[in-house]
Image: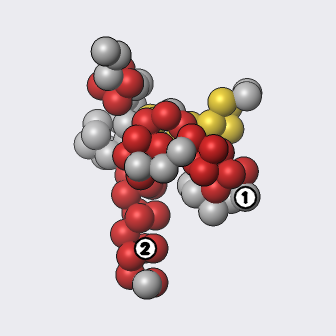
Amino acid sequence: MNDAITATTKVNLDGASPSDSEILTVLDVARFLRVPKSTVYKLARLGQLPASKIGKHWRFLRRDIHDWMHNRTQQS
C-alpha cells in the first residue's frame, strides 16, 4: 500500500518545521479530515478550505489545514 502522506513533497518556508510546511494532496486532506475527496474539492473551490491550485491540481499546506480545523472548532 502506498502511503501518500509520507510520499508528499516537503519544503521549508521561513524556518517552519518540515511537517508544518508539508504539501498535501486532495487525497491526503480527505484522509486527514475523514471526508470524501469530493468534499475537499468543493471546499477548496468555494474558498472555504485554504488551498492553492497549481495547474489542474489542488495543494494544501499541513499547517493551514491544522489552523483551519482549530479555528472551526473554536467557532462551534
Amino acid type of the residue that numbered disc 2 sits on in the rendered structure: Asn
Residue 4 % position (x, y)? 38, 24
x and y percentages locating residue 43 in the rendered image: 64, 56
Q: Quadrant of residue 55?
A: top right
Give the residue pinned by disc 2: 71
For badge 1, the amino acid type reads: Leu
* Disc 2 element: helix
Would residue 73 be visible to someone looking at this image?
A: yes
Q: Nearer the viewer, residue 47 or 2?
A: 2
Residue 46, percent from left and from top: 73, 58
**Residue at (32% x, 46% y) in the render:** 20
> Is 55 in front, or is 73?
73
Q: Is residue 22 above or below residue 1?
A: below
Q: Which mark is residue 46?
A: 1
Against 57, residue 71 (above or below) is below
Comes first in the chain, label 1 or label 2 = 1
